[in-house]
Amino acid sequence: MFKKLLPCLGKYKKYAFLTPIFVVVEVILEVFIPFLMARIVDVGIKNGDTEFIIRTGIIMIIMALLALGFGVLHGRFAAVASVGFAKGIRKKLFDKIQDFSFANIDKFTTPSLITRLTTDVTHAQHSFMMVIRIMVRSPIMLISATIMSITINRKLSLIFLFAIPVLGLTFYLVAVNAFPRFKAMLKAYDNMNASVQENLIAIRTVKAFVRDDYENKKFIDAAENVRLAQKRAEKLLIWTSPAMQLVMYACIMAVSWFGGNMIIGGIMEPGELFSYITYSTQILVSLMIMSWVFVSVVLSRASIARIVEILDEKIDITDEESNNKLEVKDGSVIFENVSFSYSKDKNNLTLENCNFSIKSGETIGIIGGTGSGKTTLVQLIPRLYDVLEGRILVGGHDVREYNLKVLRDAVAMVLQKNVLFSGTIKENLKWGNENASDEEIIEACKIAQAYDFIMSFPDGFDTQLGQGGVNLSGGQKQRLTIARALLKKPKVLILDDSTSAVDTATDRKIRENLRKNVSETTVIIIAQRIASVIDADKIIVIDDGKINGIGTHEELLRTNSIYREVYESQKKGVA
């Protein structure tokens, strides 16, 4: 899995390459220091050779300083490489998510995507730093120290033949059983993040309904599930450190016992035993560090799998086969035998055999009950989803023939949920057209009946909006999003129940302004109120995913029972 992420290193590859080289040099220097110490004891001190002791001591100091320097450098390079690696992963993840279709987004929850972009990437970053630094240092140290210890005394080195298999078996058993537990722990993190995100977004509703206690309990339950999942995973990992320490102390005791006997028997020199104990410690510490890194890699493996899952996700809407030179010439829209299913199952259709045509510049109303498929229908026009059967033509061409950017620039859509971003009102409006002039912004706001309330604020267009536009009313947000869409100067403008929060007089003025000022734009209005579509050129009635009727207001009153029933019920409500 790491191989799939290595391209994320980008310009930081040189740091990742230099880190293990400097690590190897540092380890070699460190390994020779105990050998020199043994020479000082067994040669210099034993023979009373002061000159040899000083000369060897100076060499040791130089090697120690060089080891320190290389250690600092590889530490810095590893940090730079790992941070750059994390940056590359986040960018690649974010770019991939930006390319997701609505169907891809539906597959992964927002909290899960946030966890993958934050917690999982952090785990991958730490794991990568350990791989290029510690996972190089520890094995090299282990091998080098083992070679030196064998050089000093082969018989004494047989102790490690018993220690290493015990540790290897322990680590293997932990790895096999820990991975699924860490995966479950990260899933618990997703659920906890979902609880936090939902609560923070809806904090005003929570307070309005005095549901603080309920939300607190929900969060505590989610946090408790994370704790239990962590505890279950850690239960296995706690065995690694005791096992390591047990083996380490047992080895040191064995070396001290057998080595001491060898000194008494004249087989071994005191300096050799001293250096051998140092090498034994280096071997065992290397094994301990490898076990610690091993635990981290087990944890990050689950995180990396979740990251790769996003990167490997097949995007079901692409423009690879589109004609990059094709432009949307007008706002005509034709549905030909269109069927659609979110599950891509022909036996579970959301829309079935929809047929109708819209001329460029027409105003079309869409009426239907909740869940009838109105929003789904219009989301197919800019290819937020792809049809299951049939085809949709915009400007005389199948939508699949257009480059996605070209198509979506030509189709402006104001969704049911009004989304505004932190920043000023002007910055939000320029999402529609970043090069829009002040005159164009003012004109769009006047058409959307937003200009007056904007100018009522002390800072006007420079008024700061909270996240999601929390300091605006629902109707104000709707009018701003309509103005933002108008700044795109689209061929097709889709208003998905986007005047539901404004009064009927303002709704009427917006529709009148659209007719006067954007007469060449095709306007599709989804509404619950018949008053919002009564003067449309055509009205489409949708019932249970099927086109139930098409006509003007007068025609549908005569011929369509569903439309007539809705009209009469709303008329009575007004009366």
Image (cartoon, rainbow, N blue to C red):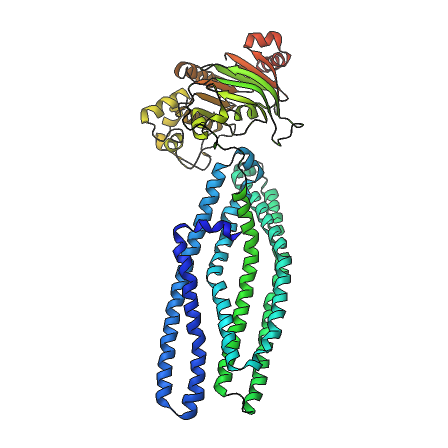
Location of residue 384 with respect to 38 vertically, above or below:
above
In the image: residue 534, left or right of residue 167? left
Q: Residue at x 47, y 66 (%)?
A: 137
Residue 66 is situated, as x and y percent measured from the top left of the image, at: 37, 71
Q: Nearer the viewer, residue 460 or 396?
A: 396
Residue 163 is situated, as x and y percent measured from the top left of the image, at: 60, 73
Location of residue 391 with respect to 9 vertically, above or below:
above
Residue 446, image quadrant: top left
Residue 564 is situated, as x and y percent measured from the top left of the image, at: 61, 11
Q: Residue at x 39, y 56 (%)?
A: 14
Location of residue 327 with respect to 84 vertically, above or below:
above
Whether residue 534 is visible, yes or no, is no
In the image: residue 53, left or right of residue 279? left
Taking the view exactly as shown, the residue that stands out farthest to the right is: 347
Q: Residue at x 52, y 87 (%)?
A: 268
Q: Nearer the viewer, residue 97 or 401?
A: 401
Whether residue 509 is visible, yes or no, is yes
